[in-house]
Image (cartoon, rainbow, N blue to C red):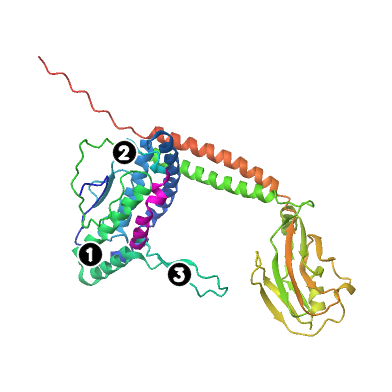
Amino acid sequence: MTAYPVRVEARLEEPLNRGLWIVKWLLAIPHYIVLSLLWIAFAVLTVIAFFAILFTGRYPRTLFDFNVGVLRWTWRVAYYTYGALATDRYPPFTLGPAPDYPATLEIDYPERLSRGLVLIKWWLLAIPHYLIVGLFTSGSVISWRGDLPDDSGGVLYTLDWGGLIGLLVLIAALFLLFTGRYPQGLYDLVIGMNRWSLRVAAYAALMTDAYPPFRLEQGGHELPRMDAHPASSPVRHGAGSVVAITLGALLAFAGIATAATATGTALLNGTRDSAGFISTTAGRVSTSAYALTTEQIAVAGQGVRFLRESVGRVRIETTGTPLFIGIARQDDVTAYLGGVAHERITHLAFPPGEAGYDHHPGTAPASPPTAETFWAASGSGSLTWDIQPGDWAAVIMNADGSPGVTTDITLAATLPWLDRLTWGLVIATVVLLFAGTGLVLAGIRLAVEPASEPAQPAPTP
């Protein structure tokens, strides 16, 4: 066995406080907040590194050392909290190495990386390790179900039960609580699983081409180094560099999100019909009673202007035999359907699925809906309505008032704001990506490059 380029070291610091582990989740909240931002930066920088490796065969050193720092920071926090509970010493807030801390992580910088492997190693080659690490960290179990009500034949699903690391750390916590000691064999096993997980994380993050070994190296110490050449000095990221790179990555991530949203709104805008409406898919509604009605639609105050500018004109369409569709004030609908058997639609399912209803018992209506004059808008098979202030409800019935209503209903609106939103998102994308890229580059420039070795003076003759 040879040393792996990802080295995870740890030492058990005893005595440990019996009850401190109960509140470590609270004490670690500042770290969790910072790490949530750093991991977004980690993901963005890994994508940048992917293209850099693909085209140059090199992982940019400044980005590499930043991402190593994120993994190093994560390992220290996990060691302090519920990834190991093996120290009571509070983790330092730094991306750099902390050799005096009882949990350390180092990754050898690869001078060259395979351009071909970068395309497949993080998803295809790492699948066997993902299955193992999933059991270590989240306990995801893949199962097959065939008892679905729609007889679809079964689905794959996951059942999360905490993972082996979480279970073993819980047992260790109980030992601490009652005996004040951390069982050494349990500690060695927990560290071995964490070491395996961190190696896979580094491999999946493109930081090495060395395939993680399928071996559980237990205990706090790695195999001895077998390097023929000493590792090069890492780039040092000061506070300004860390803040600039993290903020830049966050802005770039937001830019990617706005770009995806702009693409979605542009595609949605392209679905307009000849009348300028954008429609939902059809949703099936059905009742054996005399009418279907919607829940109350309240339009008041600033909501009137907002709905007119955002939703625009509204259209309701039914398929099959033309049905009466009407919109009226809620009071008029309540008076008309008072004592009439009808159902109120509580939710629609798009695409067609099981809709929800509230049943109201009663008898037949005194007159067909076409004979009433209180409708603000009505139609046969289709209705178009300009939003007005007030409390409204929509009603679907047979034109002659007979029972039994079954149809597929489609909702549509003109959405006049969609063009402006799309252009606004495009502009926001450009600004965020340029600002994010600029900050990342500034953070790289602020990083301190390793000092070159001083030249040795020539010996005196």
Q: Which residue is mark 2?
A: 110
Secondary structure, mark 1, is helix
Mark 1 → mark 3, Cα distance in angstroms: 33 Å
Q: Residue at x 35, y 63 (%)?
A: 135
Kind of residue at disc 3: Trp
Residue 121 lies in the magenta-colored region: yes
Of labels 1 and 3, earlier in sequence is 3
The magenta span reads 119-136
Alpha carbon distance from label 1 to label 2: 34 Å
Local packing at callout 1 (Cα closer than 10 Å; few below 14, some 14-19, many 20+) is some
289 vs 413, nearest the viewer: 289
Q: Is residue 179 magenta?
A: no
Q: Which mark is residue 333?
A: none
Whole-percent x and y of residue 34? 40, 50
Q: Is residue 346 left or right of residue 65?
A: right
Q: What amino acid is found at the position of numbered circle 1 in the picture?
A: Leu
Residue 317 in which image quadrant: bottom right
The residue to which callout 1 is attached is 186
Horizontally, is 255 left or right of 384 in the view? left
Image depth: mark 1 or mark 3 in front: 3
Res. 144 mark: 3
Q: Could you tell me the amino acid type at mark 2?
A: Pro
